[in-house]
């Protein structure tokens, strides 16, 4: 299947024909969904009645506007009340502040990072984001970084036995593509990061979460149903 990954990377127009695909890399299956620069990509967290908690609630809110999700996934860690951990910007409004301090758990495994969507897509190390103050219409902070300018996170171990279902996002070098990935079987950080870098050819990638990882992708038969989640990211299209 490596030829398929290479083909999708070299021919982004082919990838755009179907937003989501199943891809196997080094015998590990993944679900992969891609957003292009002109797509209506948004972050979602709350509506008038509080946190959405899942993709079905987002779709219900969009239906009133004649729209729906093409695909979506959870987009960062969250507190028990579903509030975001770290920076969260929705439609230009900062709703949760940036965290740059080292801390426990995966989020605090520096460097962590911020996925930023505006005129294009970018992933910034969190402290670089603080220094540069880029303009993002949507942004979500998470951690750890998976790939940093073509290098894997320095703390990843090739033989780590910490394996989980994991999801994250990678961005192309030109900032025109954001690629959202969930593993379809447990993987360690090293293998997950290598899929973004070596399988998809993406120089920067950010981990969103593990164990609670969910994807809504009707093209792949994925409803994303389950327990409640916090921030979500997805592409919006007209209802057909």
Image (cartoon, rainbow, N blue to C red):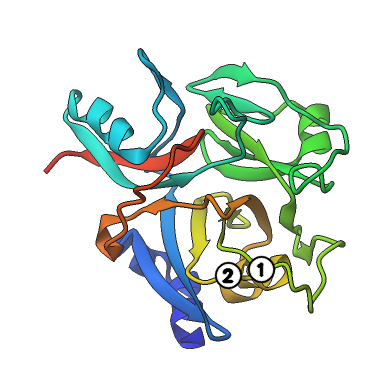
The numbered dot on residue 186 is 2
Residue 135 in sight from this viewpoint: no
Q: Give the percent coordinates (x, y) of residue 189.
A: 71, 65
Instruction: Read off the residue under disc 1.
Output: 163
Q: Nearer the viewer, residue 147 or 220?
A: 220
**Cα distance in 3D space between marks 2 and 1:** 5 Å
**In the current view of this chain or complex, which residue is farthest to the top?**
48
Q: Give the percent coordinates (x, y) of residue 91.
A: 47, 22
Q: Do the residues under discs 2 and 1 have CB atoms within 8 angstroms? A: yes
The numbered dot on residue 204 is none
Residue 207 in the figure: left or right of residue 149: left
Q: Give the percent coordinates (x, y) of residue 5.
A: 48, 77
Determine whether 188 is above or below 28 in the image.
above
- Quarter location, residue 55: top left
Q: Quadrant of the C terminus?
A: top left
Q: Residue at x 70, y 21 (%)?
A: 97
Going from N to C along the chain, the mark reached first, 2 or 1, is 1
Residue count near mark 1 (Cα–Cα under 10 Å), binned few <14, some 14–19, many ≥20: some
* Callout 1: SS: loop
């Amino acid at each position: 299947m490596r030829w398929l990954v290479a083909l999708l990377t070299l021919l982004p127009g082919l990838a755009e024909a179907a937003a989501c695909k199943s891809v196997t890399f080094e015998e590990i299956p993944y679900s992969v969904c891609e957003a292009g620069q002109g797509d209506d990509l948004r972050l979602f967290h709350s509506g008038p009645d509080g946190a959405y908690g899942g993709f079905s609630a987002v779709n219900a809110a969009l239906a009133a506007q004649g729209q729906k999700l093409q695909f979506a996934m959870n987009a960062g860690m969250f507190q028990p009340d579903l509030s975001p951990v770290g920076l969260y910007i929705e439609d230009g409004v900062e709703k949760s502040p940036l965290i740059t301090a080292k801390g426990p758990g995966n989020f605090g495994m520096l460097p962590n990072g911020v996925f930023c969507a505006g005129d294009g897509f970018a992933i910034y190390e969190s402290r670089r984001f603080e220094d540069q103050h880029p303009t993002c219409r949507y942004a979500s902070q998470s951690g750890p970084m998976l790939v940093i300018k073509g290098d894997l996170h320095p703390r990843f171990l090739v033989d780590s036995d910490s394996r989980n279902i994991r999801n994250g996002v990678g961005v192309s070098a030109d900032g025109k593509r954001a690629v959202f990935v969930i593993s379809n079987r447990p993987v360690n950080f090293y293998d997950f990061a290598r899929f973004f870098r070596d399988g998809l050819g993406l120089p920067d990638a950010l981990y969103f979460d593990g164990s609670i990882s969910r994807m809504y992708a009707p093209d792949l038969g994925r409803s994303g149903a389950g327990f409640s989640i916090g921030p979500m990211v997805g592409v919006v299209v007209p209802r057909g």
